[in-house]
Structures are given as C-alpha cells and as structure tokens.
Amino acid sequence: MTTLSVTGEPLVDTPRASTVLARFAGNRLALTGAVLLLLIVLFSFVGPLLYHTDQVHTDLLHARLTPGTDGHPLGTDELGYDVLGRLMVAGRTSLVIGVLAGLIATAIGAVWGSLAGYIGGWADTVLMRVVDTGVAIPALFLLLVAATLVTPSVGILAVIIGCVSWLVPARLMRAETVSLRERDYIKAIAVIGAGRLRIVFRHIVPNAIGTIVVNVTFQIADAILLVAYVSFLGLGVPPPSTNWGAMLSKGITYTYDGAWWLILPPGIAIVLVICAVNFVGDGLREALGGKR
Amino acid sequence: MTEPVLDISDLRVAYGDGAPALVDFACTVAPGEIVALVGESGSGKSTAALSVLGLLPSNAKVSGSITLAGQDVLGLRGEELRAIRGRGAGMIFQEPMTALNPLLRIGFQLAEAIRNHDPKPRRHRQYHDECVALLDRVGVPEPESRLRQYPHQLSGGLRQRVMIAIAIAATPQLIIADEPTTALDVTVQQQILDLLRDIRDTEGTATLLITHNMGVVADIADRVLVMRAGRVVEEAKTATLFESPSADYTSTLLAAVPHLGEHEHEAAVEPVDQPVLAMTDLVVDYGGSKRAVDSVSLSVGAGEILGLVGESGSGKTTIGNCALGLVSPKSGQISLFGGPLPRRTGRSAKAIRRRIGAVFQDPASSLDPRMTVAQTIAEPLVVHTSASRRDRLAKVSELLDAVELPESLLSRYGHELSGGQRQRVSLARALVLGPDLLIADEPTSALDVSVQAAVLDVLVNLHERYGFGCLFISHDLAVVDSLCDRVAVMRAGQIVEQGPTGEVLRTPKHPYTASLLLSSPVPDPAQQRERRRKRLAA
C-alpha cells in the first residue's frame, strides 16, 4: 500500500487474524475443542437433514425400545421418540440458548463490573449493591417468574437467562478491574487525559479478555443447565420441542428400569459441549496474544 | 596457602533444554575473604550462588565440582545436604520480608536456625540466650523485646540484620549473600555492608557476595569476578579491577556506572520567572500517624530538570502523583503552567494534561500488554488530536527514532521487548504530544547499569531537543548528579535542602544530605576507603 511507504513498516492495529489463527491452531487442546464443537454443531443442525425421524408425533407402541432395535440406533424414549433424532433436535435449542445467554450475561456483567471497578467510590457502592441484591434472589426464582409472565420461546428464554445470570461475571470483572486499575499503564493513560470510557473499554476490558472469555464458557455451561431446570419444572420451551437438559431430567425417572440410553446420550452431549467450549476458551485466551 | 572454604571448578548449569545458564564457572573463596560476583541480570550470578547449597530448581542440569568446607556438594543428598546448609554456608537473600516467615516470631525463627544444627536439639525457648547474643552481634537494638516481634514489625534494615543473624547462627565458614542490600536504602545498605565486613574481621567468615552494584563491590570486596552471559569474563583484585580492567566488558560496565561528583555543573541556574510546576505548602495525609508529605514547596522552571531525591517512604512518589493529579493534597497549592491544577476530568483538564507527560518505574507494567508499540505511542495522539492515521504514523516514527529504537519494533507487543526498550517506549509515549512538563518517577531504577546509562542518554538528548521541564524522582544521587540542574532532598515528607545540583551535592548544608552523600557507594575502592574513614569519624 502506498500510505505505508512513508516508513516502510505497516502500522498494525490489532494482532493480525492470521497470527491469532496460527497460534490457536498450534494449541492441540484448543484445536480438539474447536473440532469437537464443530462436530456437535453439525450433528445438531445438519444431522436432522440426513437422519429423518418423527419428533412431533408420539408412538407409545414403540416406547422405550433398547438401542439397536427396529432402526433406532439409540433406542426410543418413553413417548416413542427416536433418541438419536431427539438428541439432534434438543441440541439446537440447548446450543442456541446456551451461547446467546452466555454472551448476553457476560457482556452485561463485563460492562457493569468494569465501570464499577474503575470509577470506584460512590458509583462502585451503588452498582455493586445492586449486584449483591440480585445474588440474594435465586436465579431460578426470577426465571420462573419471568417464564410465567411471557410465553417462552428460544429467543426469549435466552434473553431472560442472560439477564438473570450476569451477576457473577459482574463481580469477577470488578475484581479484575480493581487490580488492573493500579497498573502503571493505566495510570499513564489516565494522566495523558484519556476519558474514563476510553480507559475502561480500550485498556481495561481488552486486558481482562482472558477472564471474560473463560467466563463466557462457564456461562454457556450454566445456561444449558438452567434451561434444563426450567424445562424440568414444565416452564421451558413448550413441547414437542425439547433440549438436552429436559431429556436428561425426563430420563432420570427411568433410571431404575435400566434405561441408560435415556440418560447417557444427553449427559455425554452436555459434558462434551462444556469441555469443548472450555478448551476453545483457553486456546483463545492464549492465542489473543499479550502475556498476562 | 590455606585450603579454600569454597572451591568451584568447571561448573556448568543448564535449565531444561535451554542454553546453559553457567559455563566453565570456576571460583575459590579463601577463609576470611570477601569475593564479589558482579554482572547484569541474566548473567548467571544467582545460579552460581544457589548451586553452592544445592538450591537449584529440579529442572537444572548440573555438572562440574563444588567443594564446600572439604565436602563435595554435588554428591550430597538428603540429610548430608541439609547438614551442610547453614553449617557449611549460610545464605542471605535479597528481600528480607519474603525470606522470613511472616507468621512466626523472630525469636522462633532464630532458635530454629540454631536448633537445626544442634547435635542435641532442645526446646525452642531454651535457646533464648543464644538468640539474644546473636541479635546483639548483628547490631539489633533491644534484642530481648525483638525476639517476641514478627517480621512485619521490623524495618527493612533490621529484617536484613535478622537474616544475617540466622545465616551466622550455625557459625558457617562461608556466607553467601545474594544482592543483600538491593532492596534497602543507601544509608541502611551502608550499615549492612559494615556489618558484613565486621563479621569477616572478627569471626573470619568468608563471604561470597552477589551484586550488580559496582559501588558495593568497591566498598567491601577483596576480589571480583565479573560475569556475563554465564561466563566469567574477568577475575581480579578489587583495586586492580577498578584501576585497569582487562576485559572490554568490564570497562564498558564501569563506564556505565554514574559517578557521583564527577559531573561538571555550570555555576548557578538563572531563577525562572514562570515555572511550569509550582507547589506551595503542600500537605498530603494518607491517614496514618505521619503525614506523607508535610508542607513541601518546590518549583520546576521551563526547560529545567529538578531532581527529587530521598529514601523509600520519604514521600517523593506522592509528590509526583500530586503533580499528575493522581493524589489530591489535603492542603496547599499546586499550579501548572501558571494556573491551578485541574480536576481529573473536563475540557480544561484535558487541555492541561496534554502538556504533561509521565514515565513510571516498573518497565513490566508500564505498557498495555494488549497494544503494540505503535498503538501505545499513538494513544495520546488519539486522545488529544484528530490527526489522520498517516500523520499519527509519521509522528510515532519520529518519536521512535528520537528514543533510538528501530522501526521494526512498531508491531511488537510490550512483553516482547527488554526492560530498557520498554522504558524508551514509555518515554516516547510521554513525549509524543510535545509536553512542557515531564514527571519521571524512578524511570531507570529497575534497569541494569548499562541499560540505565543508555536510557539516561536518550533522556538527555530528548531534553535538548524538546526542552521540556522535568521533575525527576530518584533515589540514586549519582544519576541525579549527572542529569539535573537543581536538586531537592526529601526526608520523612519534608524537603530538607534544595538548590543547584553542584551546590547541594558538593557542599551539603543539611546533615542528612551529607550522610546520604557519604553512604552512596562510589565505584572506586580508594575513594570508598576514604569515605568510610570519614563516616566512622563523623
């Protein structure tokens, strides 16, 4: 580019995407996580296109078939739905709600916590007392109240879960900010005359990215489980649509009948997603550069 | 010739699969001799010291031979190794606060050191008399009551004395002192060095002293080993080394050490009519029993460098922070460029901040780890100007050139740079807007001497080029002497003396300034001997 010929060296704004990608790819665990996540997403979203099952009509004649019978590789559940097909459909709901809610919660929490931590004093007291009050009310209770007021759909459920679970990330972010605030480079930027918002969003939040990314992964995991609770109480996304949490809680009823195929598949799916998201989070933190 | 206490030969240490930290290291220490290992950070001097007592981390690969008090240390394991630690050689570390257990009383820790090498161990409290005698030996006042105190109740100097008491508790033949005075103020450093010399003179204990400070070497060492990148580059008697160094590296190292009193100062600087920074009767109170800053008045003229010197806790950093608006004073006035200090935010504050730059001490935390060098230096431009990307780039390049860094560093991150490079980037960031006032808070204290010399050179050149006024905060009199037009000396929150550098540092009027000057070690053994005589006479 001609503008660069002034010095011959490009003025780099952010770490180049290619270097981040290269560093990420060099991390074997992160790469495993990314591949796993991709497979799960494909399984949930592309799977139903290849593996056709009826997930709308119940079929009590073929309820609780053991895996392998009658073209049901993972058997059927108590209403006669094919478990493998159900796992795919349920995955869609869980993944969408989990990711959306995790992002919403972390975004609110990060902004709230970093402002409280950086401005300090009076604003800190007010903002954090709000958080303390929120923590005192169980998230499940808030969720149930919200679920009775509006008809839950996937989108609405994600927003509601996001809005009740930002409290922990806010506390984390405040703690991180308070420690970052005392670093010399923040002082140096402050004495230059940079505004508070610039300091918080340009210097503090990017340096807390490790905390934020790791927290997103936990929030995603939490959200998937929260959806499960709400569904268990009958207030989740209305049937016949379902999610992994709901499958798990229903399956637990049949534990003593030896119907392991109702518990293990959704359980393993949840564990795999959470592991994959965690690996990716770890890898991202390292790949984004800047040793901590 | 008597058998040496410590005899190291062909020592080679490597950590993991990395490059060796120590190669062909050989060193002997005779009874009653003080041998200094000198070098900059990463030269392998601490590795050499730690290997003597088998304290290296488990990933270290060691070969060669180390004979301490007639025993081959490298062959020792378990109980035998434990026996030689403390009895064969005692160790003193750099930071006495972290080397002592904060939860145990001084008396217990001392008794423990004696008990460990007692053939018939008794209960801790039965060592009371020995402990009192030891503390008395190392010059701790009121030893009886000190025994019941915890480490945090002692000052840094007293803690280091306790560490020395622990090191000599088992009457070792050798003391290994790893930067024993680096964390201490100069006056305290002098007392500790005097104590180490006294222990050598009366008990005949040999000492292996690891240090980066040429002044300390000149003061106390009999023989010196100069190290660089894991190798000994020169070994000589102290006097010979300072008089006629044979290795090039030694000459460079010696030349880089700022010398107190060798810098020519022009008579007196003209008093300035319009100071860029003026403080009158400034008081800062953090709520303790003492005021951090107690009615301080000073001014920095346009284009002038004012050195603010003092020991730790004297309030010099607080004054810098007041000027930057990071700390609000309890009373007194601060005026910047003739106007009052603005509040932290607002448009007028921004206009004034534009004219102030700041550099801080710690190179590790002074740069935003998420930003490249180019972004870091351009940040003030982004905040204060609407310059186009291209103009910013041109300005950044100009500054990078001014601090003598290559353009290839523009896209690097802070952690990829060395300490000296980081401080240069900090300087560039502070000066990119062409400020009229620079607040520099110990900008070179964390750097090696040769790096410090280079950074100070850069600072002098920048000052000539941009002509800013500067408040230069430092504890190092020699640095201040070489750099500043005027000096203010602080003690316990007050300025005890201020005036032109030449006057204050040549003919001090206040006794504290005089004692500070006498305590600052000078890298010249003959001069150091003379100063010691003066100090003892005083």
Image: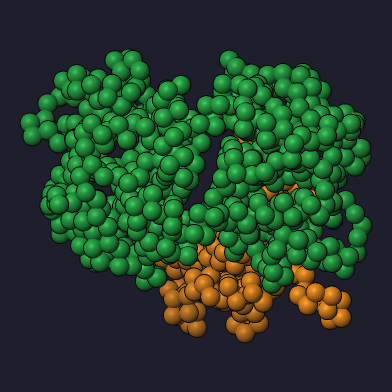
Tell which of B130 and B188 is nearer to you: B188
Residue B268 can be seen, yes or no? yes
| Residue B398 as seen in the image, left or right of residue B490 | right
The picture places residue A203, in percent across and down from the top left corner, at 72, 51
Examine the rendered structure and indicate whether residue B118 appears above or below residue A252. Answer: above
Tell which of B127 and A71 is nearer to you: B127
Write the residue at 48% across / 30% down.
B187
Q: Which chain is green?
A: B
Determine which quarter of the picture holds residue A79: bottom right
Determine which quarter of the picture holds residue B112: top left
The picture places residue B131, in percent across and down from the top left corner, at 23, 23
Write the residue at 19% across / 49% down.
B5
Residue B353 can be seen, yes or no? no
Determine which quarter of the picture holds residue A187: top right
Tell which of B290 and B124 is nearer to you: B290
Write the residue at 24% across / 55% down.
B28
Write the residue at 51% across / 36% down.
B520
Instruction: Specify the color scheme.
Output: by chain
Chain A pictured colour: orange
Q: Tag count in the figure?
A: 0
| Residue B439 as seen in the image, left or right of residue A76 | right
The picture places residue B442, in percent across and down from the top left corner, at 63, 42
Tell which of A159 and A209 is nearer to you: A209
The picture places residue A101, in percent across and down from the top left corner, at 68, 55
Outermost residue, left side: B120
